[in-house]
Amino acid sequence: MSLLQVIKKRIILDIIRSVNTKSKFKIMITDEFSLKILSSVCTMTEIMKEQVNLVESIKTRRQPLPDIDAIYLLSPIKESAELLIQDFEEKQMYAGAHVFFTSPLDEKLESLILQKKIGSYVRISRNFKDANLELIPFESQAFHLMLPNILYPLYEVPYQAEQILDTITTRLFCLFSMYEQMPIIRTSNSDLARRVGAKLHNKLKIFQSRVKNFPPRKERSVMIIFDRSYDPVSPLLHEFTYQAMVYDNIQLVNDKYQQQIINRTGNATTKEVSLDEKDSIWKEKRHKHIAMVIQEITTEFNNFLEKNQTAKFAKGHKISLKEMSDVIRQIPQYQEQINAYSLHLGMTEECMKFFDILKLEIVATLEQNLVMGVGPSGKPLGNIVQDIKMAFDQQPLTEENRLRILLLYAAIEGKNTSEFFALKDAARISGSQRSIITNYVSWLKISSEKIVTEEKRKIKKNKSFHPQETTGEEKFELSRYEPPLVKILEQTLTSQLDSNAFPFIDSSDEFAELGQDNQNSLNKNNKTKTSLRSERTRIKPTFANKNRKERQKAEKEKQVDDSEKDPFANIKIPRIILFFVGGCSYSELRTIYEISSKRDVEIILGTTSMIKPSAFLSDLKKSD
């Protein structure tokens, strides 16, 4: 069951269906945060099927409906609590209020509500099953905590940092209360990551001591917590997969694209389109290279036009009476499919327009050469500093792209070199943006020395960007770099992740059970003692058993050979959960889907917020 399904199940079963009312219908009242959670997993149609015929904001003026019960789904903040009180303090807004908070309500706010004379109308639901929904699942394997723009307070304002870490901990606690698990928690070797890990571990332990039989599930997920200092490179690089290009180059509002549609009269109208997993084309192609996406969508669209009866009719082809009947039935689906292809053809065209306008081939070539340390063919580079300075001087690169290259140079080659200071002058970064450089090297612990190893530089010759030269999973010259997350996940799956670089919050978890197969592999030298009687009963001296023993031996030897060829063959981890404090890039999001599919393991990615490169730079800027 995906994270989206887990949260939907909780909302439908544990909240909406748990409310029994005298009236046939119910209404639902939300605040801004709870509405985002609700709308991320449920459509209005799905909610209405549960006899909820109206969803309203607690902030808006509403018509009193004293004969209908209301389900309140609210975040546990003072503003929402006070608005709830107002609904019943002076008048009876609804027949009754069944109040659910997205995480446990603190005693002060609960007292505030109960002290008012509204008790006969309001039932507050605070038990384990009713709470703990404080995360936004924006994809089937990914969630965020709706905490953008937090780098400055995290690193510069201690009291705000502590509040943010407490909020992060509370919202992560919600995740494991839903999964009903005590995770094995590991963190990158940074202060922020360790603090979040320790707070979460303590909160879960306290909860375990208070709630009988928690956790009910014995299997344990592995959670790894990072902050952005573990990888300061990935959020800056230009990524040319479809989703990453859309978010980096196209102006979206709340993950919605403004699609221009020409109607039958020839007039242009604008339609707001959500980019989510309900769109089958988006879901299938979002993590593919843009060149492959253009090629695939164009081919599929042409095939659709060639085979579809409605398309043939629209072109003026002669069709039979029966085919005409089929055309009439297919018109709505035809128009829907045409709009879908039009959307993605339009977005890919817009992405490529920006690729040309922003000189991204030049920019990305410099980036890839810099982070890989070699050219596309694997040959050593010439003077990379001179190449960058020449691009700064002779090419119309935007200030954002000059800044991204400059920060990448600091991360790879060191922040205190004479070459870095020369590039800093050549980049001509305006005064208002210079704090980004200072904060990047300070907050993310950028080294004074070169960090790229020779191992990372060993690459094969890759394909160019040109769409006609691409097939399958081939690499591209402008996409040679892989996020460090790839290696971290591979090592986690084979129990080889360095415990010094990624320490366990609870040291006893280093030898904890990750699943039956893992336990067997860890204990393969510990033979179980059996009695002589049981041994005799188990193995009988017959030719059948002899043959069976030989077959079993052969199968076992084959499994050993297979596992030596593929170290992932026998790995069984219930779930890996990655969490990024300070934001996560779209290249890292792509990575978890690719490895999850390749290794047949569930990987969930969580973050305080998703960050496109411009948002990352903005977050690094000194707060005004």
Image (tube, rainbow, N blue to C red):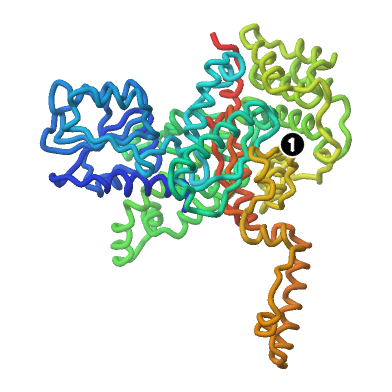
Q: Nearest the camera: 356 or 172?
A: 172
Looking at the rendering, which quadrant does residue 462 occupy? top right
**Amino acid type of the residue tagged 1 in the rendering:** Ala
Quadrant in which the C terminus is drawn: top right
Q: Residues within 10 Å of mark 1 (few under 14, many from 20)?
A: few
Looking at the rendering, which quadrant does residue 287 occupy? top right
Q: Residue at x 69, y 77 (%)?
A: 531
Residue placed under numbered mark 1 in the picture? 501
Q: Residue at x 64, y 37 (%)?
A: 505
Q: Nearest the camera: 256 or 438?
A: 438
Q: Nearest the camera: 484 or 76?
A: 76
- In the rendered structure, the answer to whether residue 420 lies left or right of residue 270 reads right
The percent position of residue 618, horizontal first and vertical second, equals: 57, 19
Q: Residue at x 67, y 57 (%)?
A: 518
Asked if 516 appears above or below 365 in the picture, the reply is below
Identify the element where label 1 is drawn. Answer: loop
Residue farthest toward the bottom in the current orientation of the protein:
543
- In the rendered structure, the answer to whether residue 268 lies left or right of residue 68 reads right
Q: Is residue 271 visible?
A: no
Asked if 20 appears above or below 363 in the picture, the reply is below
The percent position of residue 180, horizontal first and vertical second, equals: 47, 48
The percent position of residue 442, horizontal first and vertical second, equals: 70, 17
- In the rendered structure, the answer to whether residue 608 lies left or right of residue 95 reads right
- In the rendered structure, the answer to whether residue 365 lies left or right of residue 580 reads right
